[in-house]
Image (cartoon, rainbow, N blue to C red):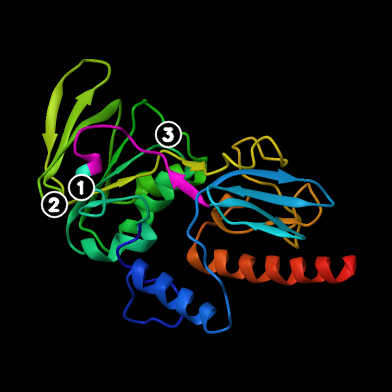
Amino acid sequence: MTDWVENYPGFPDGISGYELIDRMKRQAENFGLEVRNQEVLALELTPKKKKVVTEGGVMEAKALILTTGAAPQRLGIDGEALLTGKGISYCATCDGPFYRDQEVAVIGGGDTAVEEAIFLTRFVSKVYLLHRRDRLRAIKLLQERAMAQEKIQILWNTVATRIVGETEVKGLDLKDVKTGYETHLPVQGVFIFIGYSPNNQLAKDLLELDKWGFVKTNNDMETSISGVFAAGDIRSKSLRQVSTAVGEGAAALVAAQRYIEGLQ
């Protein structure tokens, strides 16, 4: 989903999300990895046996690593689906440098939205922070930093009703939720931070989750069922980046290997 990755070690000029994943896949295949492109329909998990039910049949394993990730919550307004990746982003650290000296909008009022708005001031000329209420939900320290930042202008009681553009973002249609007054805001980029939803459909009735639905693990990435591990964005944690996902994947794999050796 990420057009260009600039914060992964070893690629000083950046790399497309597709190429990074393709390189990882080919490297793993060189060591004998078998890739099966099948939809997983259900999981059957017990401490003694793990079953993966797919459209092609049932596979049994001694250990399982869950890496189903998370998806950014969408606004669901006109223009969002059309322009995602063409001026709409859900990751400022990934895409912020593309908007150097341009004006952008950040939608949201929580910690992530305010943090990312502050981060964007390193590159852009102006950040409009849109929040549907008259006060932010972010912690006080972040609020103070945002309000002290000259490049950030907070638009209170404001929602976006449409993202304008055909091949790239041209602006936002806005509405004041108190007065109903409608305006248009010309911006070149839109960053949406209204939360993430874990892709937990396979695990939500089987594993222990946090209050947001992410899978809980210990330091070895093991879940509430022994022999079942989780890594990446599906896991309950504070930072969701490619680099942390890779590190967790390595930790989960080593722990799974030790678990299987212990069975033997």
Q: Is residue 67 left or right of residue 94?
A: right
The numbered mark, 2 or 1, whose residue comes first in the sequence reads 1
Instruction: Kindly identify which numbered label has been placed on residue 143.
Output: none
Q: Residue at x 11, y 51 (%)?
A: 167
Instruction: Kindly identify which numbered label has been placed on residue 136.
Output: 3
Q: What amino acid is at disc 3?
A: Leu
Magenta span of residues: 69-81
The residue indicated by pointer 1 is 83
Q: Is residue 28 left or right of residue 207?
A: left
Between disc 2 and disc 3, the foreground one is 2
Residue 57 rendering spot, x and y as whole percentages: 60, 50
Q: Is residue 95 left or right of residue 125?
A: right
Q: Is residue 65 left or right of residue 13?
A: right
Between residues 134 and 131, which one lies in front from this camera angle? 131
Q: What amino acid is at disc 1?
A: Leu
Q: Secondary structure at mark 1?
A: helix
Q: Residues within 10 Å of mark 3 (few under 14, many from 20)?
A: many
**Does the magenta portion include 77?**
yes
Q: Residue at x 66, y 45 (%)?
A: 43
Quarter of the picture containing the C terminus is bottom right
Quarter-of-image position of residue 106:
top left
Mark 2 and mark 1 in contact? Answer it, CB < 8 Å. Answer: yes
The residue indicated by pointer 2 is 168
Q: Secondary structure at mark 3?
A: loop
Quarter-of-image position of residue 212:
top right
Between disc 1 and disc 3, the foreground one is 1
